[in-house]
Amino acid sequence: MIYEAILTTRARKGLSRQSISNYIKENYDVSKTHNFYLRTSLARLVEEECLIQDKQHFALDSEERQRYRALKKRRLNKKKKSAKKKKAPTKRKTKGKGKGKGKGKGKGKGKGKGKGKGKGKGKGKGKGKGKGKKKN
């Protein structure tokens, strides 16, 4: 977004942080805290020498400017190649209303008792205390 702001305005001396912020607000839906992210990213880009800072203005390095423009051209070329011509939809023949077979009750799987394992009462040996009579 920062590169785009600097390239589209074409300012000779670069853009101030405030003008970059205004450009981003106009063109993108951003949160209220975007100024914090803008400040940190500008500082990082200056440190990496992608941006040149002169007083309070930021300008793109000439190599970065060429690289960004080449990247943008590649993206446009890919979009043009991927865009295919769509065929016109063919008209479907509509069926006339008349007597015919309607939707009947077909054979289908209904809700029934399955043979799967469930939480049923079984005749297994349990570890719990039973309340039955003791055998002597």
Image (spheres, rainbow, N blue to C red):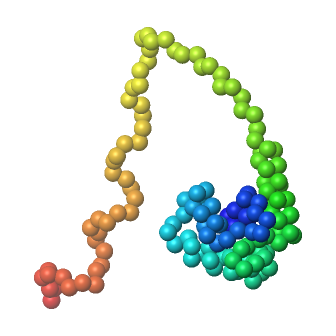
Q: How many marks?
A: 0
113 or 47, which lies in front? 47
| Relative image position of residue 37 (x, y in whole percent) | 59, 75
Residue 46 % position (x, y): 74, 80
Q: Quadrant of the N terminus?
A: bottom right
Front residue of this view, candidates 42 and 55: 55
Q: Is residue 46 above or below residue 20?
A: below
Residue situated furthest bottom in the rendering: 136
Front residue of 30 and 15: 15
Of 57 and 40, nearer the camera is: 57
Residue 57 at what x, y percent from top left? 71, 74
Which quarter of the picture shows residue 125? bottom left
* Quarter occupied by the C terminus: bottom left
Horizontal arrangement in the rendering, residue 98 relative to residue 61 (left or right): left
Q: Give residue 122's quadrant in the image.
A: bottom left
- Is the residue 93 above or below the residue 108 in the image? above
Q: Is residue 43 left or right of residue 114?
A: right
Give the answer, above or below, for where 116 lies relative to 21.
above
Residue sitting at 81 percent across and 44 percent down? 81
Residue drawn at (79%, 56%) of the image: 72
> Which residue sits at x=14%, y=81%?
131
**Residue 74 percent coordinates (x, y):** 83, 55
